[in-house]
Amino acid sequence: MRWLAMGALLATAAHADPWADRWGSFLGSAELPAVMAQYRVLDALDGIEDKEEGCAQHGASLRRARDAQPFSPALQLAMVRCAVGEKARTEALALLGAQRAFLLREGRGQSVLRPVLVATESDAAALVEGAGWTPLYGRYKVGAPGGSLPFIAIFLDERGQEKQLYFDFLRVWQRLDRDQPDARFPAYLAALSAQFLRGAEGVRNPAAELANISARLGDGKLELLDASVAIERLALDGYPPAAFEMLPLCLVAQDTACLKSARALVAPLAERGLSEAHLVLALAFDVDGDKRAASKHIDRAAKRLGQAQANLAYAQLAFSLGERGRTLLARQCLERAARADLADAAFLQAQLAKPNRQRNWLERAAKAGSPAAAAQLALNAWRAKNARQARQWMKTAADAGDPAGLALMALAAEVGSNQVAPDLDRAYRYFLRAADAGNAGAMRRLGRAFARGELGRSVDVVEAEGWYLSASVRGNQTAALALGELYLDGHEGLRGSAQDGLRIIEELAGGGLVAARLRLASVLIERNSDGDAERGLKLLVELADEGQAAASFRLGQIAEFGQAGQAADATLARAHYQRAATAGHAAARDYLARALYDGRGGPRDRAAALRWWTQAADAGWRPAANSLAWVQCSSRDPAVRDPQAGTRRISEVLGVDRNANYQDTLAACLAASGLLDQAIETQREAIAQAMEATDISDSQRADFERRLASYLAGEAWEEN
């Protein structure tokens, strides 16, 4: 179907949606290099001063480019300019309007969660210009959800009010870059953003250069005053947002010369009426204690933004300075904006409110349209075990594309409730949406799902690597540790190696992450070369002295089994287990109970052993439940023996995990209760499972066979 006819089709067949169909086809088949190549015709047209000559020379190329990239406002606006005759111009304008309506539908462009998806800055400019609005400037937003780099276009609408639209070029690039096998992961989008920013310095794109400076400053790769100097250069070159960024930086640095330069750069922009210029000047006056002058500039900004929006913008700007910016004026502006039912203002007010007022502001923000507030209300209701209310709020948040709301919907689908059964496929789909929206927890959950074969997925370590890496890029340390573990396991097909895994864990440990320090200690002990074991032991002792129960437990294992070059010491092992068990470590309680039961490392105390096993089992530690059931069914001690209780306990465990050891225990319990036929059948099942299991030794399998022989002889299995 020819695109020139599509405007008429939309007008006559409102029920059809050919734009959406073509958009899906475009994303599913177009290639990024080919799409981006179409924009070269715009450079060719700009290179010819005479418009008619340029259109005549490149008209055919322009039409081919527009047909190849039918969602480009820049190419369609060029078609309008090159149209010959009233009819052709009317058709081109109609198509431009229909294209714009499609790109902006469903609230697209109103927030970073729902940006307009176009491929270039020229498309953003053309969309604004084609609507009859007056462009002012644009900037990139660093640190947006999902690792992308949204572009914000600021303009004057037909009433002279300052407005803004959010665009996202990189998400389009990501979807079209089919040559990259990892392009579907958020980590690829983050890498694409970083690559784009690195290339900004050589292409004279001031918006991208400013974003690059901000990113380096945020990562600690650039000092504050060095950043202000770099930003000042952009401001002197005539890029307004640079001046707006410079003044707050100078306030943070408390540098008089920097402030003087920044004010001089902002003042002319304020004279032009730019609202952001008035707001940063208001901030400078407010921090200096001149509330009257600050209020005057906020009122001037309100002429372009509206009073409530100006109050909110000022409060957000002031609070970005931290405690220094939480002035009386900033708090007053926020409350006025919140009481005007601006959603973002009410949500910010909720975050700052006292606990007894927080819920009222959250509800007010959610009703005003804040998806983040709805997500917080959903989380609060979830924690209060109010499933109905939680689902109501999380759906509101998820429908608006909020990452936290989508993640909560995924969790709710995964665990289910009394009224709703778990739906793993639905959970998986919501986790995907949450991850795409930038939720690092959802990315980590997807990584674990593919690493362990959960959520109805098959084990796929390559897929797991992509999701763990994506969550790590977003700062999720738990995912980074899991990624390091994945590399250390040495799976084939991964981009990372075991050495990469060790490096990741060392970096996390160096940053103080306890789980990483524990894992690093284990890795060093396992490697046991060039003093590694000594380093690992030292690290474990440090962690144990800090009160980390897992470290005490590991030291107990080392002492019990004589690992890491240490002589076996049952007394020392028992002391370590005691310390960890007292701190609540479930496995340590199991190991301590075994030592107490057998009298290893100290006096035998079977009553204490039963108490520790019971505590661990009741807390959900299945190995302890198995140990307890085993002694209850196999012991000759009347103070311990209780086959009925043992059968009940091990049956509950098998309802969750049917492994060979647990089956072996159940068989012993059945035999102890006189149910020998059932014991024989169960023991045979245990032996069959043991033959397939990789974690069961030959000596254990031999024990299984001996117990089967006992049951076949009509005897229960008993031990001292």
Image (cartoon, helix red, strand yellow):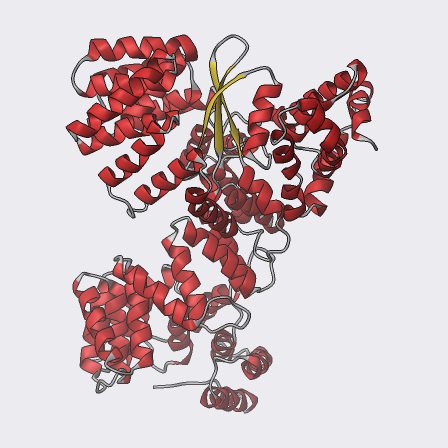
Looking at the image, which residue is at 34% across and 64% down? 505
Question: Is residue 555 in sight in this rendering?
Answer: yes
**Left or right: 25 as drawn, with respect to 434:** right
Looking at the image, which residue is at 54% across and 65% down? 461
**Residue 470 x %, y %:** 47, 52
> How many numbered circles does the render carry?
0
Looking at the image, which residue is at 47% across and 57% down? 468
**Left or right: 339 as drawn, with respect to 126:** left
Q: Quadrant of residue 632?
A: bottom left
Quarter of the image for the C terminus: give it: bottom left
Quarter of the image for the N terminus: give it: top right
Q: Name the one closer to the observer, 645 or 369.
A: 369
Q: Quadrant of residue 340?
A: top left
**Left or right: 528 as drawn, with respect to 50:** left
**Residue 385 x %, y %:** 44, 38
Q: Quadrant of residue 224?
A: top left
**Residue 250 x %, y %:** 22, 30
Q: Name the one closer to the observer, 474 or 374.
A: 474
Question: Is residue 278 in sight in this rendering?
Answer: no
Q: Is residue 490 above or below residue 170?
A: below
**Residue 291 x %, y %:** 20, 12
